[in-house]
Image: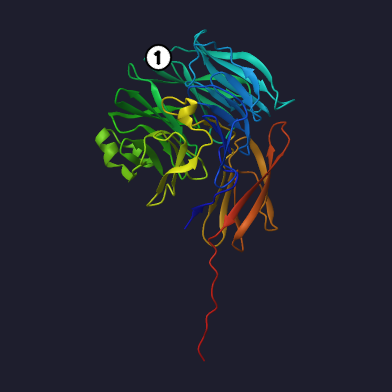
Amino acid sequence: MSASLVASAQKEDNVWIFAGNRIDFTTEPPTVTLVACDYSTEENITSVADSEGNLVYWLNGTSLYNSNDEVIYSLPVGSNAFYFYGLSIVPFPGRDNVYLFVYPDVNRGEMVVSIADGSKDLLHPEITEHYANFPFYYASGNEPDGVPLFFQKYGSRDFWLLYFWFDKIKVYALTSEGFSYTGNVYNLPAGSCISGCEMTPDRSKIVATTMNWWDAIFIDLDTKTGEIKCVNPFTLSSVASYAFSSGNKYMYYSNADGFYRIPVEALGRISTGDEFESNSEFVGASGCSVGDVKFLTSGDFYFHNESNGGYIGVIKDCDAPHPVIDNKWLKLAKNANEHGASWGNALPKTYCYPYGFFAEEGCGGEVLLTFNDGDSESIHWDFGDGSETTATGQSVSHTYAANGRYKVRFTVNYSDSRQPQVYERSIDIKNIISKRPRIVAE
């Protein structure tokens, strides 16, 4: 018997900026307010959070904002900017309070990569333009080429960058030294482009779908090595948008009928659209037209209700036999359709250092605790029950004597010149069964 414990800081992000709304997930239900600025964007917003999931910066098609919604940099993209593709902002590996942001500049025909150095003043960072650039091409009516997609390397602060350009996907590494090409490349069928890309919640691989009309290809990238492989291409007409459940068990997807899910392990063996559909399970009707979808590591699945742009929907208990769908779970402060969010009404892309604190509870109070940072040399664990230990690995096992909530405090020591970092996470122990005393008849 085992269960994944929900830790309070497992969320990828605590704040979304979406269609004029600020959605704060630190409360239950989330608090929704209008953003404290007047901005205009036709499409997606991307943001970056610190290791605790707190919003640091957010980026749209025209400006870079700080957590106070102040414009700290206006993008030199002109009136012809394409707002959706390529917007990214990620922590610069190994540089505290330094972030790298990427945006497309159609006028210059490139993806511009710049740096926001907030090491002296996080709210008002120093901006360095044009740190590096990649070619970018966008032809009206077609998908763009030259779009970078960032994902964190497994067990590390470094990132992989998937960059696709004219029927090829190339893999770059982003480290504290900057970008480097790994040599890993995959040739796509002619005319293909990436239409969706998601990391599995265990952060072990990335699955990308490419669409050439209805031809889909699942591309599997190993986040430990940066190697990519192709799972058989097949014809598919049923996936509008998709995301992985936080338990790493299912890939959820939407279509005109509602929501479906397919086991993640099935994706490695299917070779036809019929097999994809036969391995899928109908979850339930959405009751609306569904825009973009998104999971948080807290466990819930969120979607934008396009039929009524003023609502975010949710699916609860996503890995359970009978998930629950609520298409009007959260009312926005400002109607997204009125604000002008256009095709897809894309929910924000978010990045942070997903250090990956995991707690796996077995029977009898035994818990496997993991802090997944590949740069750590040793970790000193204070389990919150009066006992502590130091381990050289990233995982340690501990047995608690009683059910309850415990505050785990751990100090991470690094092999380089960085100072030790101290973190706290709360976990709930629930699997200890009290034995009743036997009553013996006299």
Closest to the observer, 227 or 169: 169
Q: Residue at x 33, y 40 (%)?
A: 258
Instruction: Tell me if residue 126 can be seen.
Output: yes
Closest to the observer, 270 or 348: 348
Instruction: Tell me if residue 346 can be seen.
Output: no
Q: Is residue 441 left or right of residue 427?
A: left
Q: Position of residue 338 (x, y in %)?
A: 47, 28
Q: SS class of the residue under badge 1?
A: loop
Q: Is residue 254 left or right of residue 83?
A: left
Q: Position of residue 195 (x, y in %)?
A: 39, 25
Q: Position of residue 356 (x, y in %)?
A: 57, 41
Closest to the observer, 288 or 171: 288
Q: Tell which residue pokes out farthest to the bottom in this image.
A: 442
- Residue type pointed to by label 1: Phe
Q: Position of residue 127 (x, y in %)?
A: 67, 17
Q: Residue 118: name its quadrant.
A: top right
Badge count: 1
Q: Tell which residue pokes out farthest to the left in this image.
A: 274
Q: Which residue is mark 1?
A: 166
Q: Taking 77 as reference, is 297 above or below it?
A: below
Question: What's the coloring here?
Answer: rainbow
Label 1: few (<14), some (14–19) or many (≥20) C-alpha neighbours in 10 Å: some
